[in-house]
Image (cartoon, coloured by chain):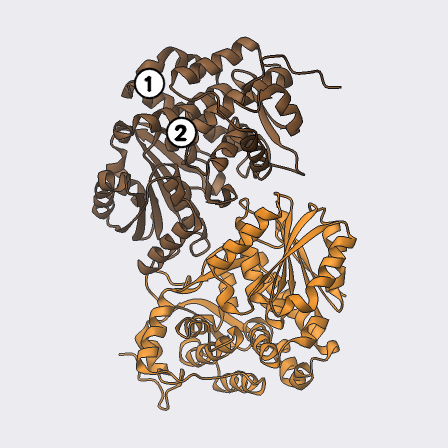
Chain colours: A brown, B orange
Amino acid sequence: MRSIRVPLGTRSYSIAVDRGVLSRVGAACARLKLGRRCLVVTDSNVGPRYAAAVEQSLADAGFDPRRITVPAGEPAKRLATAARCYDACAAHRLERDSFIVALGGGVVGDLAGFVAATYLRSIPFIQLPTTLLAQVDSSVGGKTAVNLRAGKNLVGAFHQPRWVGCDIDALRTLPEREFRSGLAEVVKYGIISDAPLFRRLERDLERLLERQTGVLGPVIARCCAIKADVIARDENESGPRAVLNFGHTIGHGLEVISRYGRYLHGEAVSVGMVAASALSVPFAGLEETEFERIRALLHRAGLPTDARLTPRQWERLVAAMRLDKKVRRGELQFVLAERIGKAIWGRQLPARLIARVLDPATLWRRPAPPARNR
Amino acid sequence: MRSIRVPLGTRSYSIAVDRGVLSRVGAACARLKLGRRCLVVTDSNVGPRYAAAVEQSLADAGFDPRRITVPAGEPAKRLATAARCYDACAAHRLERDSFIVALGGGVVGDLAGFVAATYLRSIPFIQLPTTLLAQVDSSVGGKTAVNLRAGKNLVGAFHQPRWVGCDIDALRTLPEREFRSGLAEVVKYGIISDAPLFRRLERDLERLLERQTGVLGPVIARCCAIKADVIARDENESGPRAVLNFGHTIGHGLEVISRYGRYLHGEAVSVGMVAASALSVPFAGLEETEFERIRALLHRAGLPTDARLTPRQWERLVAAMRLDKKVRRGELQFVLAERIGKAIWGRQLPARLIARVLDPATLWRRPAPPARNR
C-alpha cells in the first residue's frame, strides 16, 4: 500500500493507493473518529458493483450508512441533484460530525463534496474514487462543484476530504473510454512537473492500457503526490495551483459548448492540452519536438488531439472560455509549457492571438507560422 | 458615524452604523479595491425603495452594477432562488474579484451571502442590511444559508462579508411588526452578555419603538460590537459562538413547523427566549425575578411570549429541533441564562425534561413546579 500525505495543517489527510481499499474504508473512518451516521453517495453504474462492500465495511466498523444513487454521467452534477442529496442528509438526520462518502468518479466526488461542504455549513467527507481520472485528479485537493448551464463547476466550494481511498481493483471494470480519458490527466502531470514520469508513460503506455497493477499503482501514487505537493503550496488557487489547469481552459470550453455531452472530461482536456502546447511553442518557447511528443503520446493513448468546429462553435467556445472561473478582467488566462516537466501560469492571451496560432476550425495549428505581432 | 471592526485576521472587516450609509456604499467598495462588476441582490419590498440609490453610488464610484430582485419573505430563501442568482452572476459575467451586494433583510443577506460563498467557489460580498434584525444580527458574522423543507438554514457556508453598512434611515420605512421582531435579537444581546444594555432597553423601550435615531444608533452599534466580539473568539461556531443562539433552538423549531409562515424570525425567537429562560430557572439558576423581567420586556416590545400548540404540533416541534444543526448525537442542545448578562451554552436537555418545565400546549411554564428528577 502506498500512502500519500496531503499536508494542509488541521485539514491534512492521507491518500491510500492499493488493491482492495474499498473494503477497508470502515477501519479508516474509525481511525478518524467520525460520527456514526453517514450517507454514501454513488451513481447508477458504480453503486450496484461496489456500494454493498463499502456499506458492509462501514457497518462492520460500527457506522450507520445510508445510500443515495444518482444518475451516472456529467448531467447529474447540478443543483437539482445536490438538492436530492440534501434531502437524503436531512432524512437520515446527519449531524455535524456525520459524514458523506463519495463512491464513484469525478462527478460523484465533486457533487458529494459540494453537498458535504454546504450541508450544515460543512460536514466531513471521504473520497472513494473509482475512475482513473478521479483517483489521480478530482478526488484530491478539495475542489467541489456543480455545473450551471452557463458553465462547468461555476458553483462550488473548497472543502478538503478527510481521507481518500484509491482502489486499483475498481479500475478493472472501468469502460475503456473512461480509462483512456483518465490517462489524459496522468499525461498532464508529466507535462507540468515531471519529465521522468512523462518518459515512463512513453515507455510503459501499453502496459498501462492493459491496466497492469504493478504499473498502475506507482503511476497513480506519483500523480497524487504531485497534486498533493501543488495544493500544499496553494490550497485555494490564488496562484501556483493554476498549473493543474493545463489544457483545461479550452477543455472546459469544449465541454460547455457540447453541453457536457460529446466529450469525456479527459478527452476535452486532451484536445485542450494539444492546443495549449501549440500555443506554448510561440508564447512560451516549447520546443517543436516536445510539442510533437505530447501530441504523439496522447494520440497513442487513444485520445482526441483536435476538434472539428464550425465558425459559430468557435465563437461559442471563446464566449464559454470568458466565463471560466480563471478569467480576470475579461482576459483569457492560459497555462503554458516551457518544456515537458515545467509549466507556467497566468499568461493572458487575447482571443485574436489564439486564432493566429490555432486554426479555429480544428483547434489544431494553422498550416502557416503565426503572423508576427505588429 | 460609528464604525465597529470585526477582527478576523485576513478576513477582518468594518461595520458602519450611520444615517445615509446606502448612498455611500460606492466609496466603501472603492476602498476595498473590488472588481468592476457587481450584482445587487435585493427583494421586491426593498428594491423599489433603495436599490436605485445604491446602484447610483456604485456607478459613481466606477462600478458596473446589475440587479436581481427576489420575492420578499422567507420562502424565497431556498435553493431555487439561489439558482436564479447564479444564473444572473453568469449572465453578468462576474469574475473572482467581482462582488455581490446584499440589499435587504436577513433573507436577502443569507441568500446573497450563500450565492457569494459558492459562486466560483466564493467571491466577495457586501452587506447592506435594511431591517433591524439584519443590522444587529444576521449581516454580521459570515453565516450564510438557505432553507430546506426539512429545516431552516440546513444548507449554507461560512463566508464573511467585506463590509457591512447599516443605514439607520432605512429603518424608518420598516413595517412595525418587522421592527419589533428585530428588537427580539436586541433583547437577546442584553440577556446573553450585557446587563447594562438590558437595563437601557427597559428604560428606553418607548423611544426605541418610536425609532428615535439618537437611541437607535448607539443600541445597534452596541449589538454589533457584542456580536463582533463573540465571533472574533469563535468564527466557525465550534463553541462560544453558540451563546448567540439563545432562544433559537425552540425558535427555529417553531419556524419549521409553521413552514416559516406564521412567525417572523424575531417573534419565534421571542417565544424561544421565554422558553429558554423558563428552562434556565431550574437548570441554570436564573432568578425568578429576572425571568419575569425578560418576559415583561419582550411583552412590552409587542412580541409573543408563548405559543399555542396541539400535541401533534409539539411532537413535530421536538422532531424539528432534533434536525437542528446544533444537535449532537441526537441530544437537544440549549443555551441557558445564568442571569441577565450571562449565558452558558452546550447544555443537553432531553425532550422529557423540557416537557416537565414547559407546558407543551403553550411553551409556557407548567402551573406546578417541575417534578423532581428521580
Looking at marks 1 and 2 on the same chain, the residue that comes earlier in the sequence is marked by 2
Q: Which mark is residue A136?
A: 2
Above or below residue B288? Residue A178 is above
Q: Nearer the viewer, mark 1 or mark 2?
A: 1
Whether residue B350 is visible here, answered yes or no, is: yes
Image quarter of the C terminus of chain A: top right
Number of residues whose C-alpha sits closer than 10 Å to that of mark 1, classed few (under 14), some (14–19) or many (20 or more): many
Spot occupied by residue B123 in the image (x, y as percentages of width and height) = 59, 47
| Direction bottom: furthest residue | B367
What kind of element bears circle 2? helix
Name the residue that disc number 1 marks: A208
From the viewer's side, name the closer residue of A286 and B326: A286
Give the total of numbered labels: 2
| Direction top: furthest residue | A289
Q: Is residue B55 left or right of residue B253?
A: right
Spot occupied by residue A215 in the image (x, y as percentages of width and height) = 32, 18
